[in-house]
Image (cartoon, grey):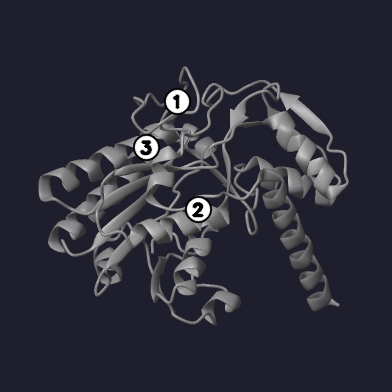
Amino acid sequence: MLGGTGFIGSHIVEEFRAVGATVVVLARNPPDIKRSLTDNVDYLQGDAHDPSILSRAMTDVDHVVHALGGQSPVEAEGDAGAALVNAARLAVSLAGELTRRPEVSLTYLSSGGAVYGNVAGLPVAESRACSPISAYGIAKLTAEHYLSMHADVHSLPIRILRVANAYGPGQTAKRGQGLIATLLDAAAASSPVSVYGDGTSLRDYVYVGDVAKAVVRLSRQRGSQPRIVNVGSGIGHSVLDVLQVVDEITGKTTKVNWRAARGFDVQGIFLDVARLRSLTPWAPVSLRDGVADAWAYRNALSADLQNASA
């Protein structure tokens, strides 16, 4: 599991554990105490970009999940070259390891918004041509192309999941990524929040627990066709919709500082999930229920921290 200590990755690890799997997590930083006590999880400390470490992590495993997010969209715009090189380099290393281990399958978590770019007609299906407008989207799509090429040439079982805007318990807004996490942090602190655009842009917000279920279920299907699968709620919500839900759940009124739209943000997108539904039962958590769960988790965590320091 690459990225198994991150927001999405940690939920995927727990979902694999729930079905009785033993998980090897490759991470640059050691796990915290809570994670180190988790059963059926082995941690290997190191950088996935180091070929020798990556090779060790892939020894005696039957499936690899690449959930390393790399740079955030904002960070990628600031250093587009690094974003592209890092994404491509890891894809090259992974492809090489998989070629030597054809019995090992791979799930790569790509972007369900940034790779498509601005499209006419929604929802967007996997067959739609991709035209990213951001460095982040180009980096993700480059990794997709390289892995797909190796899958075709060497008949490797590789699947690419284009994941929508994941949110839920454990997400933080420290990297400037994640509208819902940002709004919940602002609600908890009773502080204003900056939002880009006029609030009408649509996004597909998918509960992180649903993403984890999709990853695990599809990983147990040995075949890699169809190779590319959208993972989202299949519903578009505007920023204004999300603001209303957050205010209703938290009981707060969010003060928004509206900023000019950024050129690298897609104007509006949500995903067609018909292909996903054809592969596995799919009834995603509603936005309201997901936000309520994330808010409850945040409050519980805050209470635990206060009790620990008392």
Q: Is residue 63 visible?
A: yes
- Which circle marks residue 117 in the picture? 1
Q: Tell me where residue 27 appears, x and y as whole percent.
A: 43, 65
First along the sequence among labels 3 and 2: 3
Which type of secondary structure does the marked residue at label 3 adopt? Answer: helix
Quadrant where the N terminus lies? bottom left
Q: Amino acid at mark 3?
A: Ala
Say which residue appears at 52% left-offset and 72% top-offset: 31
Q: Position of residue 186 (x, y in %)?
A: 78, 45
Point out which mark residue 104 bears: none
Q: Is residue 264 left or right of residue 230?
A: right
Packing grade of label 3 (10 A; few <14, some 14-19, many >=20) is: many
Q: In front: 308, or 300?
A: 300
Q: Residue at x 82, y 52 (%)?
A: 188
> Front-most of 111 and 123?
123
Going from the N terminus, do you reach mark 3 or mark 1 first?
1
To which residue does mark 3 refer? 139
Please, what is the three-letter code of the amino acid marked with disc 2? Val
Please state the horizontal and vertical placement of residue 187, each as a whole percent of the image: 82, 47
Any part of residue 81 in sight: no
Label 2 residue SS: helix
Nearest to the eye among marks 3 and 2: give it. 2
Residue 135 in which image quadrant: top left
Q: Which residue is mark 2?
A: 211
Q: CA distance from mark 3 to mark 2?
A: 21 Å
